[in-house]
Image (cartoon, rainbow, N blue to C red):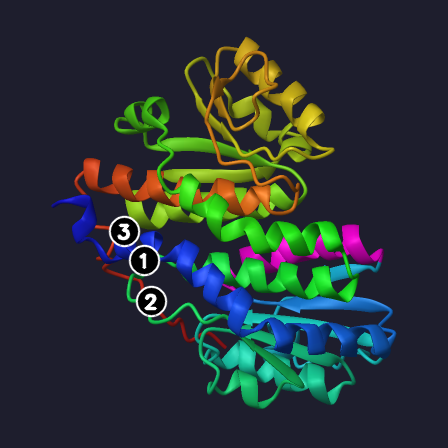
Amino acid sequence: MKPEATLMRREILEIPDSVAVLLSEERSNIEAIAKELKESNAQFIVTLARGSSNHAATFFNYAAALLTGLPVTPIGPSITSIYQAPLKLNKSASLIISQSGSSPDIFNTAQAYTAQGSLSISISNSINSPLTGVCHQNINIRAGVEKSIAATKTYVNSVVAALAILAFWKNDKSLINALGALPEHLSRARDIKWPDLHNLMLHENFIHILGRGPTLAMSNEASLKFKETCQIYADSYSAAEFLHGPVSMVKPGSPVLALVARDQAESNTNQVTDLLAKRGAMVFSTSAHSGSSRLLDYARTGHPLTDPVSIIYSFYSFIEKLSIARGNNPDEHSFLEKATQTI
């Protein structure tokens, strides 16, 4: 099978244009939502999502706390959908991310958030879904049809939409400009290759993945993609949490992937990866300042909150090629469905 033949590959190639469409077509809507958030005087933020969308929500959790100074927390859908616990959400804003907007637990919980007094905002690729009908405001991520089971362009567009809300909410000119330039940077990121990691993982069935802060969301997403496209077990940890037990699993030759952006956590993460490399681990890192790791290139975007988007985009290109090289078809999964119906 040629790489261009997979649905996943085609959708990966569409991502720069898809992001550009989102930022152009939804800008006025996002600016209006940001204005409403300013006027709401929200005291805290809650997020709701599952799967890849939950990784996008994790990214938002970190970015929102960093930019707004407000407490931000995810709440498991089962609190409402299964346990039916009432929540006191007045004076809050809620961000609900769902590609399909049709999962019963996400829909029912979003409906409860709205009823419980939260300013509810959905991010979805289906603007006419049940979810959008129960939220105060909705953002159409405009990713177009995504046929591959493995979400790629919907994940990236969800992250960008969430980041754009924050940029306009806080009137952060640097971040607004970085988002505007992001499609061009992603066009460069598309062609970056990680051959040394590719060759190693052809014959490995386990890898540790590390992130910290906003890149932890990308680590979680990379872990999922290793599993669903390559059937490689990958665990994902904060670089700090990894030292609290999981480090004991690292043996000489153990593969480690560190997704590191140019932000305040870079130096600390490098200390962890250097320690692992000295213990004999095969450490690959996107940080050029890690003394003992094998460097993985990425297209730098000039902003610490858009760098992780560029990193995960290059990872998507890498993992699709690895899946094929290991004899898999990333578009075919025996037990997976595009829209998961959980309660």
Quarter of the image holding residue 145? Answer: bottom left
Q: Secondary structure at mark 2?
A: loop
Query: Dot 1, how many residues are within 10 Å of its Cα: few (below 14), some (14-19), or many (20+)?
Result: many
Q: Of 52 and 24, which appears nearest the observer?
A: 24
User: Which mark identifies residue 146?
Assistant: 2
- The reply to whether discs 1 and 3 touch (Cβ–Cβ < 8 Å) is yes
Among numbered discs 3 and 2, the one appearing first in the sequence: 3
Residue 185: % across, % down = 49, 44
For the residues labelled 1 and 3, the Cα–Cα distance comes to: 5 Å
From where the camera sits, is residue 239 visible? yes
State how far apart marks 2 and 1 are (Cα): 7 Å
Whether residues under marks 3 and 2 lie with C-beta atoms below 8 angstroms apart, the answer is no
| Residue 226, horizontal then vertical, whole percent | 37, 43
Query: N-terminal of the two: label 2 or label 1?
Result: 1
**The disc labelled 1 sits on which kind of residue?**
Glu
The residue segment tinted magenta is 50-69
Amino acid type, residue under disc 2 in the picture: Glu
* Residue 322 in picture, x, y percent from top left: 27, 37
Overall secondary structure of the magenta section? helix
Q: Residue at x 56, y 90 (%)?
A: 133
* Residue occupying image coordinates x 50% and y 40%: 311
